[in-house]
Amino acid sequence: MYEFYPLLITGGVVGGLAIIFTVAYMTIRKQKEAIGFDRNMADSEITKRLLRYAAPFWKQFLLILLVMLLSVAYDIISPMIIGNIEEMIKADFPMSKLLIMVACYASILLVSLGSTYIQAIMLQRTGQRIVSKIREDLFIHIESLSHNQLHSIPVGKLVTRVTNDTNAISMMFTHIIVNLVKNCFIVIGVLAAMLCMNYALTLMVLCFVPFIVLFTFVFRKFSRKAYRKVKDGTTDINTYLSEHLSGMKIIQIFNREDRKKAQFDEKNNALGRAKREQIFVFGIFRPIVYMLYISSVLCLLYIGGRGYINDFSFLGQTIDSGIVVSFYLYISKFFNPIQSLAEQFNWLQSAFASAEKIFTILDIVPEVVDEPDAIELDHIEGNIEFKNVWFAYVPDEWVLRDVSFKVNARQTVAFVGSTGSGKTTILSLICRNYDIQKGQILIDGIDIKKIKISSLRSHFGQMLQDVFLFSGTIRSNILLRKEGVSDEEVMEACRYVNADRFISRLSDGLDEEVRERGNNFSAGQRQLLSFARTIVHKPEVMILDEATANIDTETELLIQNSLEKMMNIGTMLIVAHRLSTVQHADNIIYLSAGRIVEQGTHFELLEQRGRYYDLYMLQYKKQQTSKS
C-alpha cells in the first residue's frame, strides 16, 4: 500500500496544477486583445531565415558546442561523485581515496569554469558578427525602398527595427540558443545517468515530464502573442516620439502640450498593459515548473527515507543514502535547466517576435529596381525627353496626364504653375524616385529604366526647398563622403555659389559644427551649402525645386547670382513660384492639373497673354503694392 503513496502524491500535485493552469488559461483568454502586427510567420520560417545568417559561422558554433560539452560533463558527473563521497564517508573509506574523489571533483569544476569562460567569449564574438550582418542588410534594404514606400512607413518604426529588434536577436545568438542546447544536453545526460543508477526512481521523475511538456507548449502559444503586443507597443511609442519630438516647436507654439501628453500616456499605458500580460504569462509558467520540481523532491525524500530506514525497495530497486543524495542533486539539475528554459524561452519568444518584425521589413519588395539588362553611364550630355508620360501616386488619380516635352543639353528649363499641378513630380520622375505608369522618359535617347538607378542619380544634383544637413561639419555635409576632394576645391565651390561669405566669418571655417538638421544655420545659409554640395559633385544635370522659397531678399540676391553661374555648368531644371527666378530660362513650361498648357521663353509667354501672363501680372502687382 505504501508503495502507492508517491503516485497518490503525484496525482494530487498534478491535479492541483491542472486547476491552476485552467484558471490561468481562462484569465489569459479574457485578456486577449486584437493584435496589430505586420504579418504572422511560422516559427519554422523564422528559424530557417535566422539559420541562414548563422550558417557561415558553423565552424565557430561547432567549436562552441565542443567546449560546451566540457561544462555539461560537470553537471552530469558531479552528482555521482558527491554520492560516492557520501557512501565513502558512511563506510569509513581511507582518507586517501576520499581526497582523490575530492580532487577529481575540483578538477572537473575547474575545467567547467574554464570552458564556460571560453564559450562566452566565442559566443559574443560570433553572435555580434551575425547581428551586425542582419543590421547591415536591414539598413541596405531600407535604402533600396522607393520614396513612396519610405513615406508609408513611420521613421520611428524603422528605427525600432534597426535598433531594438536587432538587439533582441543579439541576445538570442549570444546567449539563448547555446544555453537552450546546453540545457537540452544536461536534461538528456542527467536522465541517462539516473537510469544507470536507479531506473525505478528515474521512472518516478519521468512521471512529471508529460505535464512539463504540456505546460511548455501552451506557454509558447501565449508568450508569443504577449511578445507581439510588446513589440507593437514599443514600435508605436517610438514612432510617436520620433514624430512629436521633431515637431515639438509646433506643439509649443499652439499650446498643445497637455493634449500630446495625454496621447503619449495612452500609448505608454498600452505598452504597460502589454508588458504586464507578458509578465503574467511568464509568472504562471515558472511557478508551475517549480511546483513540479518540489513535488518530485518530496516523492524522492519519501521513497528514499523509507528505503534507508526500513530497508525498503521500490519497484525491485534498493535505495541507499548515496543514491538519495545523487538523485536529489540530479533532480535539481534536471529541473533547473527546465526552469532556465522557461526564462530562455521567454527571451526566445522576444527574439522571434523581433525577427518577425525585421523580416517583414526585409520582405517589402522595392518598387523601383534596376532592370536585368540595365547599363551604367559614365557621362551624359543632358538631353531629356518626356514622351506621353502618365503618372499617379494613387491608382487612377493621375498627377501627370500625357505630358511630353524636350530639354536640350545645357538648357535651362523652368516649370511653373499652381500647387499640385505636377511640377515637383516631374523632377522626381527624372531621377526615378518613382516609376511612371505609362509613357517614356529618355536621357540622351536612352529610357531611364534601362539605366542603373545608382548610375542615373550620380549624374544629377538636386537642390530642394527643404535642405537636409547631417550632424557633423560643414566640410562633411558638402562632401557627403566624396573622396579625393581637397579643402581648396571645397572652398572654390563655396566661392562659386557665394557660400564663402558666411563660412569665412565662422571661427572654425569648414570645420564648423553642424547640429541636427543644421538648426544652427539660417535657411539661406543651408541653401547655399546645398548649392556648394552640388557643385563639388559636378553633376551634368541640376535640379532646383523651390530652392529660393522662404529666403530673405539679401540671400535671394546671392542665390540668384549663384544660379546664373550654375546655368553655365550643364542642363538645369527649375521649379519656382517666384517668376523672377525663371525669367532667364531657355524654356518655361506652365503646368495645370497635370497637363502642359503653355511653354516658351519669358517674353514669348508674356506676349501670349495666357496663364503665365496672368501669374506674372499678379506677382508684379504684389511687388508694386509692397513697395508702395
Image (cartoon, rainbow, N blue to C red):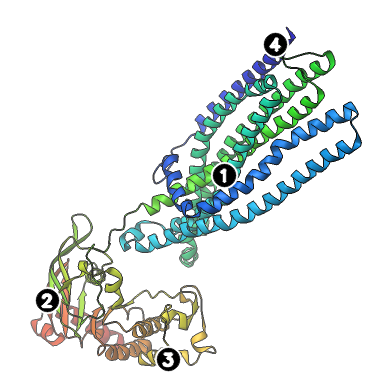
For the question of whether residue 487 can be seen, the reply is yes
Q: Nearer the viewer, mark 4 or mark 2?
A: 4
Q: How far apart are marks 4 and 2 (CA)?
A: 100 Å
> N-terminal of the two: label 4 or label 2?
4
Mark 2, secondary structure of its residue: strand
Q: What residue type is labelled 4?
A: Phe
Is 568 situated above or below 420?
A: below
Front residue (pair 270, 483): 483
Counting residues from the N terminus, which is met first, the one under dot 2 or under dot 1?
Answer: 1
Dot 4 surroundings within 10 Å: few (below 14), some, or many (20 or more)?
A: few
Read off the residue under disc 1: 347
| Residue 444: image location, x then y, percent | 17, 77
Residue 562 in the image: above or below residue 38: below
Q: Closer to the N terminus: mark 4 or mark 3?
A: 4
Q: At x 84% / y 40%, what residue is drawn? A: 100
Give the Cα separation between the discs numbered 1 and 3: 54 Å
Q: Which of marks 1 and 3 is nearer the N terminus?
A: 1
The residue tagged 4 is 4
Q: Considering the numbered disc 4 on the image, is that residue within a helix, a strand or a loop?
A: helix
